[in-house]
Amino acid sequence: MLEIRPNCECCDRDLRPEDEAWICTFECTWCPACAAGFPDRRCPNCGGNLSVRPIRPAALLVRHPASTTRVTSDSCGERSG
């Protein structure tokens, strides 16, 4: 099950579970603005491709809540706005 992380790892922008976000296979999580700046939309952490994060239906968030653990990435620091 996806963690549904609460922030963009690059700019630390809050991302609600229903917001558009981009993830890689390791669940590195990026807002659309930051993801758009990555060459070939590749994760700056692992180099993998990014996909739109699925949205967990609100009713299921009650039983399976989104993560509250914030993650930031040093490999993206110079790109943050």
Image (cartoon, helix red, strand yellow):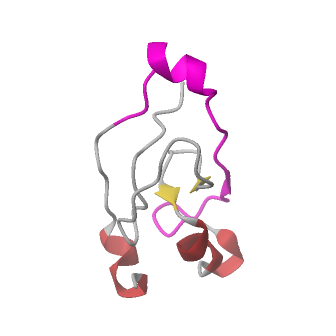
**Residue 33, percent across and down?**
58, 75
Q: Nearer the viewer, residue 36 or 20?
A: 20
User: Residue visible at 63% across and 68% down?
Assistant: 42
Would you place residue 12 above or below residue 68 in this image?
Answer: below
**Residue 9, percent across and down?**
39, 62
Q: Is the C terminus in the top left, top right, bottom left or bottom right quadrant?
A: bottom left
User: Residue visible at 51% across and 45% down?
Assistant: 26
**Residue 49, percent across and down?**
67, 59
Q: Quadrant of residue 10?
A: bottom left
Residue lying at the far top in this picture: please name it.
63
User: Residue visible at 49% across and 54% down?
Assistant: 29
Q: Give the prevailing secondary structure in the magenta stretch.
A: loop
Q: How many labels sit on residues?
A: 0
Q: Quadrant of residue 21?
A: bottom right
User: Residue visible at 31% across and 53% down?
Assistant: 71
Q: Is the N terminus in the top left, top right, bottom left or bottom right quadrant?
A: top right
Q: Nearer the viewer, residue 60 or 81?
A: 60
**Residue 25, percent across and down?**
59, 45
Q: In this rendering, would 43 be left or right of 70?
A: right
| Magenta span includes 62 | yes
Would you place residue 17 above or below residue 77 in this image?
Answer: above
Q: In this rendering, would 78 be left or right of 39?
A: left
Magenta residues, as a range?
43-67
| Magenta span includes 50 | yes
